[in-house]
Amino acid sequence: MTEANKNLIIRLTTAVVFVPLLFVLLYMMPPIAFYGLVAVATVIGGLEFFGMTHPDDKLARAIGAATCLGVSLTLYLYGTDARALLALVVLVPMIAILVPLWRLGDIATAGLRVAGGGFGPFYVGALTLLALLQKERGPDGPGYVLLTLMFAWMGDTGGYFAGRFLGKHKLYPAVSPKKTIEGAIGGLLGSAFGAVCAHFIYLRSLDLVHGLVLAVISGALGQLGDLGESLLKRSTGVKDSGQIVPGHGGILDRVDALLMAGTVVYLYTRFML
């Protein structure tokens, strides 16, 4: 079996297992249930992120993951409280510099660890915006979460098939040698298809024009998010962020585009609706 066919089977298997659970959490359970899934993913993603920036310090990785969860809980419970958000902006960088002072290790990597500690909790914690979409948008909340997932997943699927069958021109070989310009275009078309499905099937309140604009912005930034995580992995000498799906990477490998798409959709609904 070729590597491409193996990847396709893994993608389909993951969808068969995960999608029904997702629908139950979004449409049949209270919002806190979906946030529970997000919180677990945030902790695992935090461990993966700090596993790249703090590979030789298990305690620092645990502190980093706990900080990610702290950011997530604060956003979910107090996201409209300016004082809570200000506390995050101040406290996270303080923790970031105090941990390497306490756990010095190799001083040549201290700058990376400080920077990672200040950036990582906000980066991974942005996954919480999906839970806030469900919580804050009322009856349309689950639809907006599903829309965001469609932007990322349909974009990934469109990019995969366009790149596999049409890809000839490299997109950014220094960071991701396999990605192509044709794949990137296919990804944008996949995200746009996700917006069309939302408008006509499960989120009729979403204007189609706004949906397509959201799709292009979310899809483009999602692809950049994918490249950004690849950059982080390459710079730290890591092939996959984790092994949640054997042979197919970790949580961050699965949500790198979603982190960007979720941020775009949340800000749009927060300030434009």
Image (cartoon, rainbow, N blue to C red):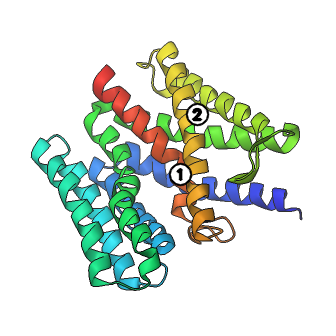
Checking the image for residue 220, the label placed there is: 2
Quick one: SS at disc 1?
A: helix
Query: Hey, what amino acid is under mark 1?
Result: Asp
Q: Are marks 2 and 1 in contact (CB under 8 Å)?
A: no
Determine crowd level at label 1: few under 14, some 14-19, many 20+ residues with C-alpha closer than 10 A. many
Q: In which quarter of the image is the C terminus?
A: top left
Residue 2 visible: yes
**Mark 1, residue position:** 256
Q: Where is residue 23 in the image (x, y as percent from the top left)?
A: 46, 46
Closest to the observer: 32 or 251? Answer: 251
Q: Which residue is drawn at 76% across and 54% down?
A: 8
Q: Where is residue 58 in the image (x, y as percent from the top left)?
A: 40, 84
Horizontal side of 80 relative to 258 (left or right) equals left
Number of numbered discs visible in the structure rendering:
2
Quarter of the rendering occupied by the N terminus: bottom right
The reply to whether residue 140 is in sight is no
Quick check: 194 left or right of 137?
A: right
Pick whichever of labels 2 and 1 is earlier in the sequence: 2
Q: Which of 176 and 207 is in front in this view?
A: 176
Look at 65% across and 43% down and name the residue there.
Answer: 156
Asked if 185 appears above or below 242 in the picture, the reply is above
Residue 92 in percent (x, y) is at 25, 61
